[in-house]
Image: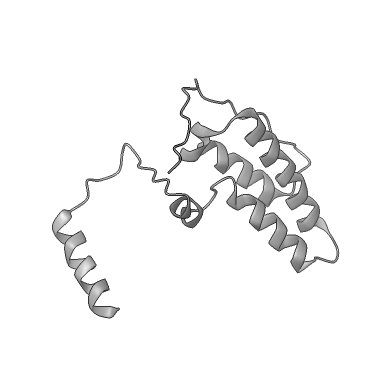
Amino acid sequence: MTSASVGVVAGSVQPAGDLKWHPIAAALWEALGESGQAQFYEPSDWAFAFSLMDDLSYYKSAERRSGQMLQSIYSAFERLLVTEGDRRRARVELERADSAPVDDENVAIMDNYRRMAE
């Protein structure tokens, strides 16, 4: 079994977005910077995300849209762990410091319901 190398980084700073982006791409760019996984982004990740926002803007502004292009864009977003599902597949769990504590009894009850439904 191979283990991953772990390095300590001081954090990465999100560069400014492009004012010409489509509003959805601009909103997603801003959300990336506020998301927990952004603490792990390296400058290369931000550059990749910037490129994706350009692609998304082009797609959203196009007169005719290609389903294949959209699928490619969404697939690329998975690499940045943009959604909860992406993070779960990568086994990354983010926890907000201000979140309410988990009620273990209710979690156990819900787990029992899930098992019975299987």
Residue displayed at 75% across by 37% down: 19
Answer with left or right where residue 46 lies relative to residue 108: right
Q: Which x, y percent locates residue 107?
A: 21, 60
Residue displayed at 47% across by 36% down: 4
Total marks in image: 0
| Res. 105 image quadrant | bottom left
Q: In the displayed orientation, state which residue is furthest to the bottom.
A: 117
Q: In the displayed orientation, state which residue is furthest to the left.
A: 105
Is residue 32 shown above or below 103? above
Residue displayed at 56% across by 33% down: 41
Is residue 106 shown above or below 52? below
Q: Which x, y percent locates residue 3?
A: 44, 37
Of residues 50 and 85, the one nearer the viewer is 85
Residue displayed at 30% across by 78% down: 118
Of residues 113 and 14, the one nearer the viewer is 113
Answer with left or right where residue 109 lies relative to residue 29: left
| Res. 112 image quadrant | bottom left
Q: Which x, y percent locates residue 68?
A: 76, 65
**Model colouring:** one colour
